Image (cartoon, grey):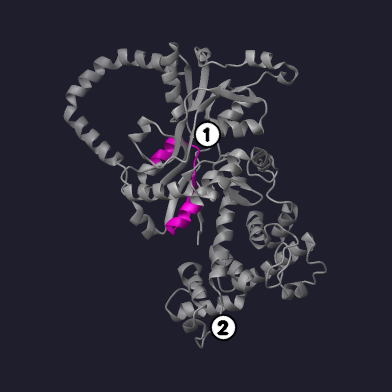
Amino acid sequence: MSWPKIVSKLRVCLVVLLPCIILFECANKGASESTEEQATIQAAPIYFDLDQIKTRGSLIAVVDNSTTGYFIYRGRPIGYEYELLTRLAKYLKVELEVRITADIQGAFDMLDSGEADIMAYHLTVTKERNRKVAFTEPHNNVPQVLVQRKPKNWRQMKLHEIEASLIRSTIDLGGKTVYTRKGSAFSDRLLNLSDEIGEDIVIDEVEGAVDTEMLIKMVLDGDIEYTIADQDVAMINATYYPDLDVETPISFPQKIAWAVRKNATDLKSIVDDWLVDMKKSPDFFVIYNRYFKNRKSQNYKVQSAYSSFSKDRISPYDDLIKEAAQKLDMDWLLLTSIVFQESKFDPESESWVGAQGLMQLTNNVIEEYEVDDVFDPEENIMAGADHLKWLMEYWSADIADENELIKFVLGSYNVGQGHVRDAMKLAKKYDADPLIWENSVAKYLELKSTPEYYQDPIVVYGYCRGSEPVKYVREILTRYDQYLQFYENPNLVSDTLIVTERIPTN
């Protein structure tokens, strides 16, 4: 519903209800004050600052699924906000936990409730928002621009004809309907612009899990005529979609920053210091240029069949992986995560210990499953799947819980079942559960790198650099969770979806 219609309806409702409201208020003044006080207390942001974050061991960031924020390309999570966040978490020496929602108001609520520590959106700093949250050091300054569609036959038109068909002055926005997502700074800018030009601009705010890029796509498809975007995001999208015009500014440059809770003063201070230093580093310019300057490269990634936006494919070997996963009775996305972990989808990959191909087959596996050409994708994937199946059967006699079973299988695929057996014995010896991976078997697998443990008489296979298989298992399952959310949720952008993942940073 448009803004003028909303205002009109509110006026009608007030005229009808005002007498009732007055009577009700007089009768219930005391109760109302009590309720308001309680609501204020409940609405107060939770206190959870840097010390608590470090004690928990993870920084929780809420992001949106956008071409510059966070998405999957060729099996790997990427994005401007995502790459900066991974470096921030590493600087803080904690893990990064990512939650995704396109609902901007929902993201602010997550910040207040403690479900997130930092809101890593492409946020415009405004006075209204400054009353609710604390903004970090800005990482960019850009103006807002109008997003409109060029005429259908613009390629056959002369430049002056194209220009004449487009809005080039903000004065011409009077009486036009512009769509924004509810809670965005764009609505406030349009209200101010209405005052400046002396004529109403009809602002249609779209509620729920809607992001700016979704509205840009609606302009492209002809569903709406106009929306607003920050210039850098708009220009990137114009690279994807040449039929869009993003040349009309509607504001001066504005600060773009992340947000934290107002009471998280220590977190804000350390993030600010980190951002000041980060913005001076070559690494920052490489990241920024990758997403906002190298537009052809970014366009290629976003439009690729191997992008999570297309939801078409993850790798060139999806069909083979699906066939092998059926033999295993395993989700093909999990097997895809394993293949990525092993070789990054490079069929000619070789490790320093001699493992080869897409699934990094060792000499023992090559001989056991009679692999003729280890660099042939089909042979390699099928042999790797056969070995995984054997490991699943091997461990299923001990471990009934399917969630635990897969961790033991993955750990064994990486380091061998003998070392995992040793870790189980050590766990039992020190009164830990030998059938639980996290903080139990995984812990003693890591401890097998110290003499006190690998020289224990119950240990058969000796020294093991156990941090590697522990990290291996964690990264595969984290990536699998990413794949599930991006490739099995066709409505990721339009649903109010929050997905949690853990990215180890050490």
Is 131 magenta? The answer is: no
**Quarter of the rendering containing residue 477:** bottom right
Q: How crowded is mark 1: few (under 14 residues within 10 Å), some or many (20 or more)?
A: many
Q: Where 419 falls versus 145 (above or below)?
A: below
The extreme right residue here reads 372
Q: Is residue 291 left or right of residue 157?
A: left
State whether residue 70 appears in this view. Answer: no
What segment carries the magenta color?
87-109
Q: Name the residue under label 1.
A: 211
Horizontal and vertical percent position of residue 107: 43, 40
Label drawn at residue 20: none
Horizontal and vertical percent position of residue 384: 71, 66
Q: What residue type is labelled 1?
A: Asp
Label drawn at residue 462: 2
Q: Where 498 falls versus 229 (above or below)?
A: below
SS type, badge 1: loop
> How many angstroms separate mark 1 from mark 2 (CA)?
53 Å
Q: How crowded is mark 2: few (under 14 residues within 10 Å), some or many (20 or more)?
A: some
Q: How many marks?
A: 2
Image point 55% across, 38% down: which residue?
Answer: 493
**Quarter of the rendering containing residue 16:** top left
Image point 52% across, 17% down: which residue?
Answer: 177
